[in-house]
Image (cartoon, rainbow, N blue to C red):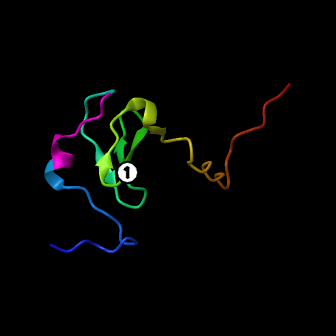
Amino acid sequence: MTTPPADSPRSIDRKLLEILVCPKTRVPLRYDAESQELISDAAQLAYPIRDGIPIMLVEEARPLNQSAAPPPAASGSSAEPEKT
């Protein structure tokens, strides 16, 4: 059995992903290989995977909006500025 190089992205076992659910909402999770996180869209949380082990604690999860970039400004928007 060979070990993947340290710089290669890890993947999560498909069977494990099928049985894991968000501890907060009890809905299935999706795997983000780039960030090495399990994503709960329902709870808007990202659970880290450390050394190949999913950390399924709400206290350890990152809010999805925490590192999200602000949405781009819409060009040609018809929104008027607020009047004071």
At 42% from the left and 38% from the top, the residue drawn is 45
Q: Quadrant of residue 23?
A: top left
Please give the range of residues in magenta. 16-23
Q: Which residue is mark 1?
A: 50
Q: How many marks?
A: 1
Dot 1 crowding, Cα within 10 Å, few <14, some 14–19, many 20+? few
At 37% from the left and 70% from the top, the residue drawn is 6
Q: Secondary structure under badge 1?
A: strand
State which quarter of the image contains the N terminus: bottom left
State which quarter of the image contains the C terminus: top right
At 31% from the left and 63% from the top, the residue drawn is 10
At 44% from the left and 36% from the top, the residue drawn is 60
Residue furthest to the right: 84
Asked if the stretch drawn in magenta spans residue 20, the answer is yes
Residue 83 locus on image (x, y percent): 83, 28
Residue 43 locus on image (x, y percent): 39, 32
Whether residue 79 sits left or right of residue 6 in the image: it is: right
Q: Amino acid at mark 1?
A: Arg
Residue 41 locus on image (x, y percent): 37, 39
Name above or below for residue 22 compared with residue 36. above
Whether residue 62 sits left or right of residue 83 in the image: it is: left
Q: Nearer the viewer, residue 40 or 36?
A: 36
Residue 30 locus on image (x, y percent): 29, 48
Q: Nearer the viewer, residue 40 or 79?
A: 40
Q: Quadrant of residue 25?
A: top left
Asked if the stretch drawn in magenta spans residue 74, the answer is no
